[in-house]
């Protein structure tokens, strides 16, 4: 009885009309914050990419030369391929390990909750802090071998991978656990009755049913890999620099510098003429991450099954 | 309960709006100074100086110090604000390239008239006086006279590279018997590599600049003509020392501690080390100033017997040309006060201030730098202030030097030096 009355009152004009009239007031804070914090800087950033400037409020339009410079910069191209490699390797490893952890922790093992909490905890620490902590850990070990994380690009790469795995696995694991728990018991039971082995159940029944989780996790880890900045800055800062002389041409490349760090270094490292170039790189960077994200979402969405 | 929560949340949304309007309102009544300082170690002293000036004249002075290593970022952000810094630091030619449009022409201002030398002035391409030095520093090779005497040598023996090498080689050969070595460690990690990629590099850059009649702007190319001399000293540093050459890249050494505790007789660094070496506080070494001396970079350049210390500064004041007239005037007045009536406090934190009426500092190294000049020796000016894209260039040189230390070819260092310069130059001037 009570329920009926309340539902009737919600749809009554006395309530609906003021909501209709004042809904903008409730939307305003969020819309304003979104516009100030995201939409405006984004548009302004695109505008700055065709400018020469020292401070952002005082820019002069110079056309698309910045884009040409960005695309012809060998360090930018190097950091692109390096980032791509990093993103793919971290994508694969994070998801396999996170899924494995999630799978194990949904098997009714003792202390499941403690493990879940502990695995999730690294995700609560900021990237810069993590970077410095891990650089101390790595250097503490590598010192005995007379080297350091900033002296060897191979070590720098795997160091970053380890750091990212440590930080991200817990987060992805939580998403996978949610997915695994949502797999209907009856399907699993049915496959058991049909005589499916544990492996068959996993690959033919469980995984297709957690495809939505896989979609979101691969999307997150791929874009995280491409956007990585703090950890990169704090752990290696792009070091070591590799100098080579080939046919008399001398080149120096920051061997562990990823895209975001390359943009940052361009912006602050090279005087005012390079700031527009850095901005152009940032716009290209946005397009790249957006396109890759969309392609990847399309690809995995197709494999999702309807329950 | 829910109602209270809702009200609280609503309030939180509104608070930032008030905060914004409040901060926009505190523009000064008439003429104020906003000094963006870049030396974290001077912050405390400058706050006190600012307060004293405000007390004396009523002009508000705000001093903000950028966190270590973030000056460029802080300046970029602050300059965008409506209440931008009126006094900031443009310490080298690259800074002039970036911030030249924001520099007020200091030519003929009372504070610029007080300068006793124009050696530390920075001009833009049109000859506008963009910034003026306020704190001169000197660097070279710091020597412990007491240890030299213990080893049977004296500072007077050392007048050029050959004599320096003879003394250092002798001490290194007898290191075990003496209980100390010639040079402190030359670590190449970030905490120490600037002593070599920055300061020692000046050995080549200064002589190149002198050959060219003194640089007034960053040259597009350098020749590396004196790199051989740079190599001489570097080899000496890394041979006549207790530290293994192959460990330098990893770093983690404390050269000041080695020198302060008498483990080595020579230590390449600058006048800013004086306080830590002679002070008696925590992490200071209480050395007797009479035992300390600083000698020039002797790298085997012809005529180097007549060289003095590397004197110069990256501490140069620029006034924001885009500030209001009142603020510019207030800032110029404040600067004038700092180099005249207020110079006692300022000198205590800045060391030598190159102004006619500023008091002299209590620092053996700076006094020595002055003495060399009085004796008619030439000052090795800071030609490295012209380095294009300085952080990247230095990082490249450090990496090449590490390769050399690990047994690589010196040609890589030459390439990083010479070609690296040309590349960084074109990167910022395209």
Image: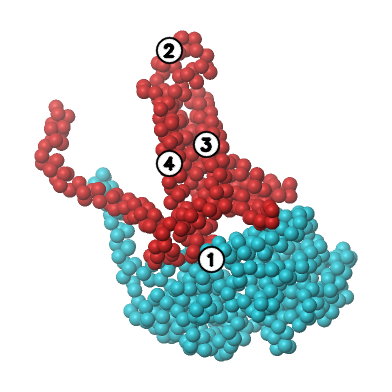
Chain colours: A red, B cyan
Instruction: Say which element carries label 3.
Output: helix
Q: Residue at x 57, y 63 (%)?
A: B426
Q: Do discs 2 and 1 share a chain? A: no
Chain letter for the residue marked with disc 3 in the picture:
A
Chain letter for the residue marked with disc 4 in the picture:
A
Q: Which residue is mark 1?
A: B429
* Above or below A192: residue B357: below
Q: Which residue is mark 3?
A: A91
Q: Which residue is mark 4?
A: A291
Q: What distance separates the C-alpha of mark 4 from that of mark 2? A: 40 Å
Q: Do discs 4 and 2 share a chain? A: yes
Chain letter for the residue marked with disc 1 in the picture:
B
Q: Residue at x 71, y 58 (%)?
A: B412
Q: Earlier in the sequence, mark 4 or mark 2?
A: 2
Q: Are marks 1 and 3 in contact (CB under 8 Å)?
A: no
Q: Do discs 2 and 3 share a chain? A: yes
């Amino acid at each position: 009885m009570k329920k009926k009355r309340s539902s009737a009152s919600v749809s009554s004009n006395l309530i609906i009309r003021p909501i209709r009239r004042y809904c903008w007031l409730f939307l305003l804070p969020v819309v304003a914050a979104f516009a100030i914090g995201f939409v405006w800087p984004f548009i302004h950033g695109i505008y700055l990419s065709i400018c020469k400037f020292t401070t952002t409020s005082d820019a002069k339009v110079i056309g698309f030369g910045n884009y040409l410079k960005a695309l012809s910069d060998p360090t930018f191209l190097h950091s692109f391929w390096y980032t791509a490699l990093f993103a793919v390797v971290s994508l694969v490893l994070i998801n396999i390990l996170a899924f494995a952890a999630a799978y194990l922790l949904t098997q009714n093992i003792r202390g499941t909750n403690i493990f879940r909490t502990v695995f999730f905890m690294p995700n609560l620490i900021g990237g810069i802090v993590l970077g410095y902590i891990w650089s101390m850990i790595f250097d503490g070990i590598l010192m005995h071998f007379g080297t350091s994380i900033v002296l060897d690009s191979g070590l720098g790469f795997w160091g970053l991978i380890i750091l990212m795995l440590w930080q991200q696995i817990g987060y992805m694991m939580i998403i996978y656990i949610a997915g695994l728990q949502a797999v209907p018991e009856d399907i699993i039971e049915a496959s058991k009755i049909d005589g499916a082995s544990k492996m068959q159940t996993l690959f033919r029944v469980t995984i297709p049913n957690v495809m939505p989780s896989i979609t979101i996790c691969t999307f997150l880890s791929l874009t995280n890999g491409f956007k990585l900045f703090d950890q990169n800055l704090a752990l290696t800062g792009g070091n070591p620099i590799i100098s080579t002389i080939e046919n008399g041409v001398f080149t120096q490349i920051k061997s562990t510098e990823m895209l975001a760090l390359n943009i940052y270094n361009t912006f602050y490292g090279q005087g005012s003429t390079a700031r527009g170039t850095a901005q152009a790189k940032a716009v290209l960077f946005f397009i790249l991450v957006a396109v890759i994200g969309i392609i990847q979402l399309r690809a995995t969405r197709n494999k999702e099954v309807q329950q | 309960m829910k109602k209270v929560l809702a009200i609280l949340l609503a309030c939180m949304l509104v608070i930032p709006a008030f905060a914004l309007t409040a901060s926009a309102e505190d523009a000064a009544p008439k003429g104020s100074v906003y000094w963006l300082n870049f030396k974290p170690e001077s912050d405390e002293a400058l706050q006190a100086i600012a307060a004293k000036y405000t007390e004396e004249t009523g002009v508000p002075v705000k001093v903000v110090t950028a966190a270590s290593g973030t000056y460029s970022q802080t300046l970029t952000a602050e300059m965008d604000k409506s209440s931008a810094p009126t006094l900031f630091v443009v310490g080298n030619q690259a800074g002039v390239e970036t911030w030249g449009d924001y520099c007020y022409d200091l030519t003929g201002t009372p504070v610029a008239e007080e300068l006793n030398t124009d050696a530390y002035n920075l001009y833009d391409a049109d000859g506008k006086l963009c910034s003026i030095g306020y704190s001169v520093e000197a660097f070279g090779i710091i020597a412990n006279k007491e240890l030299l005497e213990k080893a049977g040598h004296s500072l007077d023996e050392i007048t050029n590279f050959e004599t320096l090498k003879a003394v250092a080689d002798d001490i290194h050969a007898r290191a075990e018997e003496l209980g100390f070595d010639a040079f402190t460690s030359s670590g190449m990690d970030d905490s120490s590599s600037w002593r070599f990629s920055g300061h020692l590099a000046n050995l080549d850059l200064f002589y190149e600049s002198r050959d060219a009649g003194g640089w007034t702007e960053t040259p597009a190319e350098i020749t590396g003509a004196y790199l051989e001399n740079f190599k001489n000293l570097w080899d000496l540093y890394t041979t006549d020392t207790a530290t293994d050459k192959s460990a330098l890249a990893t770093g983690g050494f404390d050269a000041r501690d080695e020198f302060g505790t008498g483990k080595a007789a020579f230590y390449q660094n600058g006048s800013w080390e004086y306080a830590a070496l002679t002070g008696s506080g925590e992490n200071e070494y209480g050395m007797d100033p009479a035992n300390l001396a600083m000698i020039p970079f002797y790298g085997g350049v012809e005529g180097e017997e007549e060289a003095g210390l590397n004197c110069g500064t990256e501490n140069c004041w620029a006034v924001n040309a885009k500030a209001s007239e009142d603020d510019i005037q207030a800032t110029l007045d404040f600067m004038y006060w700092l180099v005249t009536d207020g110079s006692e406090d300022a000198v205590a934190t800045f060391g030598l201030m190159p102004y006619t009426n500023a008091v002299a500092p209590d620092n053996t190294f700076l006094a020595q730098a002055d003495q060399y000049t009085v004796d008619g020796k030439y000052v090795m000016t800071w030609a490295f202030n012209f380095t294009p894209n300085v952080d990247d260039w230095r990082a490249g040189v450090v990496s090449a030097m590490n390769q050399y230390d690990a047994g690589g070819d010196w040609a890589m260092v030459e390439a990083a030096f010479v070609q690296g310069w040309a590349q960084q130059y074109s990167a910022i001037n395209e």
